Amino acid sequence: MDLTGRKIVLGVTGGIAAYKSAELVSRLRHLGAEVHVIMTRNATEFVSPLTFQTLSANQVVTDTFQAPEYWNVEHVALARLAEVFVIAPATANILAKMAAGIADDMLSTTVLATKAPVLAAPAMNTGMWTAEATRANVKTLRERGVLFIGPDSGMLACGDEGAGRMSEPEAIAEEICRILNRAADMAGLRVLVTAGATRERLDPVRFITNDSSGKMGFALAEAARDRGAEVTVVCGSVSVPVPEGVRTVRIESAQDLYDAMIREAPEQDVIIQAAAVCDYRVEKQSATKIKKAEGQPLTLTLTENPDVAMAVGRNRKKGQTLVGFAAETDHVQKNAVSKLKKKNLDMIVANDVTAPGAGFNVDTNIATLITKEGSEALPLQTKRQLADVILDRILALRT
Ligand code: PMT
């Protein structure tokens, strides 16, 4: 772990776990980071600002109107300086303020203004953590991209037992390293992502398709691009703009996708197939608009499309990592495992597309990552966050 020269802003709020944040600062400094601490007034009741000042070797900010050290021109200087903004411990109160956009002290003001990734390490009584209001605030923050670590379960300072302990400083430091070191960890890799829906034409004006927006595939393409990969997106019908800085191959039907993938796949190191491919097309496409036959039912005969992922799996090149998605409505795990095997994939991302906040045409997803070794159920998070977790696991599979 190396954080040499990385700029971390740490917000400390008022909980007994604040003492563990002193150790966190110490660890981050040992790893070479530049740490700037903002404390809420309540936090200063638990640990003295002098402790953080000594450990961070920087002035600790406790008050919006304190003598200016960082914000003589603009009080959001720390928000700009942060490469990652960590809040540890994060009380129910700061989570509520962040969810509501309240900016009534230095910490809430600065975190509202930052564009850096925000990592919260909650610490509170189990009842507060499981309270409906906190659940809703955490859900809102996750949907906006705030990252969470913990809380862990165990004996709490108040004597209760359950979820609410702040994660250990070592685990938080590791998570910070992961967030910051993602920057260029895919440099030199060629990554192909399929995205969007295929369209199967019935006639010149009508088609069969599905609800895929392209958001999941594009999140993966953007994340891989930001991590230094050379990215190709093979893209069907989508409702959001294609990311900048990636090569794009447009396709319409499953057959087009098949042709594109047979051509493009051999050159790739990593292939992630998030496109929603129609399994069937009409047997005979009409060259002219199908006319309405008054009072008569219209029967379409459908024929099976090629299974693109299966073809890519059959022809896989040495050293390639193949990842598929499974869009399921029932028996999610069982169906996904069967697709993992049949399509010769290294990993499949199973999403229950009936779950609120998951699947088609939303900004978030709830996924289970399944490999031959086992499965990992992930919480609701933005598609961009999920994309980074998928890429982390792909890199781990390649080592
Ligand atoms: O685009 P969004 O609105 O963000 O929605 C995201 C998503 C729901 C489309 C995405 O998360 C997802 O689940 N994509 C896979 C959709 C799908 O086709 O699932 P499937 O279970 O039917 O297919 C399994 C795998 O085989 C997929 O990787 C698919 O790309 C591939 N496949 C399927 C059929 C086929 N004929 N050829 C294929 O290659």
Image: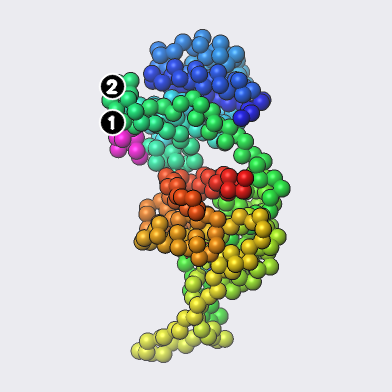
Q: Which colour scheme is used?
A: rainbow
Please indicate, yes or no, whether residue 118 appears anywhere in the rendered image: yes
Which type of secondary structure does the marked residue at label 2 adopt?
Answer: loop
Image quarter hosting the C terminus: top right
- Callout 2 amino acid: Gly
Which mark is drawn over residue 136? Answer: none
Q: Residue 97: image x %, image y %?
A: 40, 30
Whether 134 is among the magenta residues is yes
Residue at 41%, 90% (x, y): give it: 293
Identify the image quadrant of the N terminus: top right
**Residue beneath label 2, please?**
159
Closest to the observer, 74 or 269: 269
Give left or right: position of 93 versus 242. Answer: left
Q: What residue type is labelled 1?
A: Gly
Residue 203, image x, y percentages: 53, 82
* Residue 102 visible in the displayed image: no
Magenta segment: 128-136
The residue mark sitting in front, 2 or 1, is 2
Task: Give residue 204's quadrant in the image.
Answer: bottom right
Q: Is 139 on the left or on the right of 177, as rendered?
A: left
Q: Distance between the residues labelled 2 and 1?
A: 12 Å
Picture residue at 37% right of the left edge, 52% below the top: 356
- Element type at marker 1? helix
> Residue at horizontal 50%, vertical 65%?
342
Residue named by callout 1: 127
Q: Is residue 166 magenta?
A: no
Chain-order first, disc 2 or disc 1:
1
Relative to 19, does residue 211 appear above or below in the rendering? Answer: below
How many C-alpha atoms fall within 10 Å of the one at disc 2: few (<14), some, or many (≥20)?
A: few
* Nearest to the observer: residue 141 or residue 261: 261
Rendering coords of residue 291 (x, y %)? 47, 88
Q: In the image shown, does 55 or 63 lie closer to the viewer?
A: 55
